[in-house]
Image (spheres, rainbow, N blue to C red):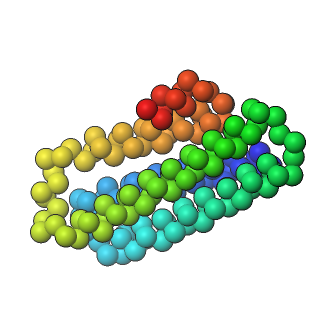
Amino acid sequence: MKELLEGNFRLLITEVVQCASEARELLIKRDGAKSRSLFHRGAYVSTLVAQLQKIAADVTVNRANGPRETLFLQGLSSISSRLERVSDILQNLDRQADFLSHVAVLYPYRLDEFFNQIFNGIEKIQPALFQQDLSRAIKLGQ
C-alpha cells in the first residue's frame, strides 16, 4: 500500500510542478490553450488528492497503525490538500492575469525568483515526508 501512496504522491508532485511551470509561462505570454491545459491539470490534481486521501483513510481504517504510521498518513493527507491549494492558487494567478492590460506590468516583480521558491519548496516535500524527517518537515512548513 505504501508503494501506491508513494507513486500517487510522486505523480501529484509532478502535476503541481507542471501547474507552476504553465502558470509562469502564462504570466509571461497569454495563451488560451495553455490556460485550458492548466485548468485541466488542476482538476487532475484534485482527483489525485482525493485518491491519496481515500487510500490513506482505507489504510487507517483497515489496519492497526502505530502512532508513527498514523502521523505519516495524516501528514500525507494534509500535504496533499495543501498541494491542491497551491494548484488552485496557480490557476487563480492565470485567471487574474486576464484582467491586466499588459503582462509586462508584472516584470518588476521578479517572477523567476517567485517561481523558483515554489519549485525548490515542492522539491523538498517528498523526501521530508517519506523519510519521515520531522525537522525538515517543520522547516518546510515555516
Q: Where does the C terminus fall, quadrant-wise?
A: top left
Observer able to see residue 87? yes
Residue 14: tell me if it is visible.
Answer: no
The residue nearer to you, when weighing 58 against 94, is: 58
Give the percent coordinates (x, y) of residue 64.
Answer: 87, 42
Rendered image quadrant of residue 126: top right
Residue sitting nearer the eye, 22 or 77: 77
Residue 19, given in percent of the width and then of the height, sits at: 43, 58
The part of the image, by quadrant, that contains residue 31 is bottom left
Q: Is residue 87 left or right of residue 71?
A: left
10 vs 69: above or below = below
* Picture residue at 60% right of the left edge, 58% below the top: 49
- The spot of residue 118 in percent (x, y) is 39, 44
Taking the image as shown, residue 12 lies to the left or right of residue 91, namely right
Q: Which quadrant would residue 66 be assigned to in this image? A: top right
Picture residue at 37% right of the left edge, 70% below the top: 34
